[in-house]
Every structure is written in structure tokens, then in C-alpha cells.
Image (spheres, rainbow, N blue to C red):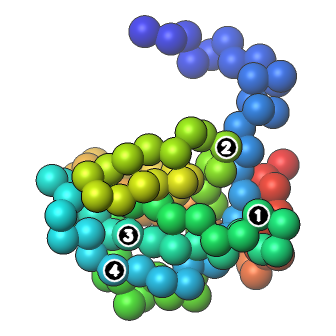
Amino acid sequence: MTDRNNLSWKEFERVDLRVGTVVDAEFFEEAIKPAIKLRIDFGAKIGIKKSSAQITDHYEPKTLIGKQIVAVINFPKKQIGPFMSECLVTGFVQDDGGIILAVPDKLALNGSRMA
């Protein structure tokens, strides 16, 4: 098991966390575990990226449109069934296993990097 207490600042700086706005969302019907497919706009420099997020316990696709979220954008792409995920949406695991999305508390410029 990795020691989580010894993450160096240099290692943290490599994680590219950005804010983006959900522009499209739909249930991922083919997924083994319940998930929602998202298209997220990270601004002109980064563009739109796709993600599959297991957030169905607390979210419906229609309520996600226009919502800003935080995602890691520099992981390698990951094939999830017939879907290619291009970023990792972040959130907080609750006691029931559900995920609450990590979101900015004010409107942020799409593509802004978390500091």
C-alpha cells in the first residue's frame, strides 16, 4: 500500500486538476456498474473531454447540464466498454458508497487549474 502521507509537492504538481462545465450527460446503458457519460467543456485551450462517472446515486443526467465540475485531465485515456473516457471526474465517497461531485463554490473560468 502506498504511504499517502509522503506525497511530494512535485508529485502533486503533476496532477492536472481543471474545472469544466458539463455540456451533455446521459446514462451509460452499457456500463457494468451504473454510470453517466459526460461531455465536459474545459475551455478553448483544452476543449471538450468525455468521462464516465459512477455518480448515479446522487445525480440525474439532466441535472448535470451546465454544472461545473473538477476533473483530472492528464490521465491516459481509458476504454470503458464501448466508451473512451478522457478525464477523471472527482468527488467525495460517502458512507453509502455514493459519490458527491467536487465543484467550485463560485463560477470559474473553464479550464482553470486547481491551485
Identify residue type, mark 2.
Asn
Tag of residue 37: 3
Residue annotated with mark 1: 46
Dot 3 and dot 4 residues touching (CB under 8 Å): yes
Identify residue type, mark 4.
Glu
Q: Is residue 14 above or below residue 87?
A: above
Picture coordinates of residue 65, whole percent (x, y): 50, 87
Which picture quadrant has residue 6?
Answer: top right
Distance CA(mark 2)–CA(mark 3): 18 Å
For discs 4 and 1, the disc positioned in front in the rendered view: 1
Secondary structure found at label 4: strand
Picture coordinates of residue 104, whole percent (x, y): 68, 69
Distance CA(mark 4)–CA(mark 1): 22 Å
The residue at the far front in this view is 82
Distance CA(mark 3)–CA(mark 4): 5 Å
Residue annotated with mark 4: 26
The answer to whether residue 90 of the structure is visible from this angle is: no
Residue annotated with mark 2: 74
Which picture quadrant has residue 53?
Answer: bottom left
Identify residue type, mark 3.
Lys
Residue drawn 76% across the image and 32% down it: 14
Along the horizontal axis of the image, is 24 left or right of 53? right
